[in-house]
Amino acid sequence: MSYPVTLIPGDGIGAEVTQAMRRVVDATGVAIEWDVQQAGEAVIAEYGTPLPEPVLDSIRRNRVGIKGPVTTPIGTGFRSVNVSLRKALDLYANLRPARTITGVASRYDDIDLIIVRENTECLYAGIEHDVIPGQAAESIRIITRRATERIVRFAFNYAREHGRKLVTAIHKANILKATDGLFLRVAQEVAAEYPEIAFNDRIVDNACMQLVQRPHEYDVLVLPNLYGDIVSDLCSGLVGGLGVSPGANIGDEIAVFEPVHGSAPKYAGQNRVNPTATILCGALMLRHLGERAAADRVEAAVAQVIAEGRQVTYDLKATRDDPTAVGTQEMADAIIAAL
């Protein structure tokens, strides 16, 4: 059988890293029917939006998508394509593994964390406006029982399915007593349905400090949207950065996989950037499709190539000016050989 998958190359370096991912996934022998769709800055002139309706139609039809990075203007311009995708397709769970890879410079040797972020509400719901233009602006934070229940249940179900032992709810209920108070109370209620999995909670600022000091005390973390965005990047920093960090946005019926790094337009077309995060997104996608053996092979091949340290991009070398560094596609070649 074959699997239809929507592929969105994205902006900047997106075309290069998604090409590398596609080649590695194809090399596993799993048959993928790639439905290539364009989104991002390059399509605005034609469609008037960075997220044309045909892209959404393709993902709804295929139920699985994988995308490269898309540029998001800061402080002006169009809304984030990532946020728009999550809202339009109700991809309420953002899944971010943070695992140590031997050969990647990091603070610790054996990190294995799963960050589960609520994806549809909180401050990222986009309910904001100017109160006094140029002087004051207001953003409304929404936390609901429904969204909290399903994201916490997602975290516990993930823990149950993957043999995890602890789920930690991250909040600021000591100060934000209504919104984060609701998040914490609902998390406690859902946790009672999973007696075989330990549960605790941490205040977000304290959790950030403890993740830096004692990350091994954590396992699966579940957080509201804004905290999840921040803490997931913190955890990526513990294992070497965004260049090795895959991500997934998952709903009840649809899943879209994406690296969490930027589009780095200054490097576009240079065959220079690290494809690891996007290739690991391909592994997450394969596992989601039920192709667990293929996913394990991709992750093992990536780990082998990085551990050997010979055929890797410049950012994975001990010094960034190492003349032995290889390009994006050459690193993909090495990973394919390792398969």
Image (cartoon, rainbow, N blue to C red):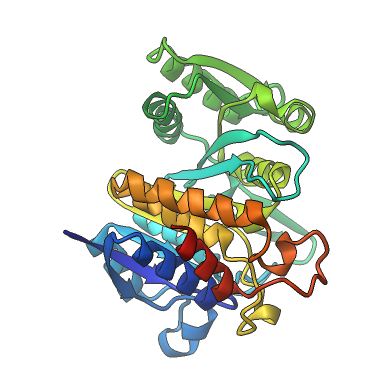
Towards the viewer: 109 or 34: 109
Residue name at image x 53 percent, y 16 percent: 199
Residue name at image x 71 percent, y 43 percent: 234
In the rendered image, the vertical position of residue 186 relative to residue 55, given as above or below: above
From this viewpoint, which residue is outermost toward the left? 1
Tell me where residue 320 sits by quadrant. bottom right
Asked if residue 276 lies left or right of residue 86, the reply is right
Towards the viewer: 24 or 244: 24
Asked if residue 286 lies left or right of residue 67, the reply is left
Residue 209: x and y in percent read 79, 30
Tell me where residue 73 sits by quadrant. bottom right
Residue name at image x 67 percent, y 63 percent: 310
Residue 169: x and y in percent read 57, 25
From this viewpoint, which residue is outermost toward the bottom? 46
Residue name at image x 62 percent, y 46 percent: 229
Residue 233: x and y in percent read 67, 47
In the rendered image, the vertical position of residue 38 relative to residue 107, given as above or below: below
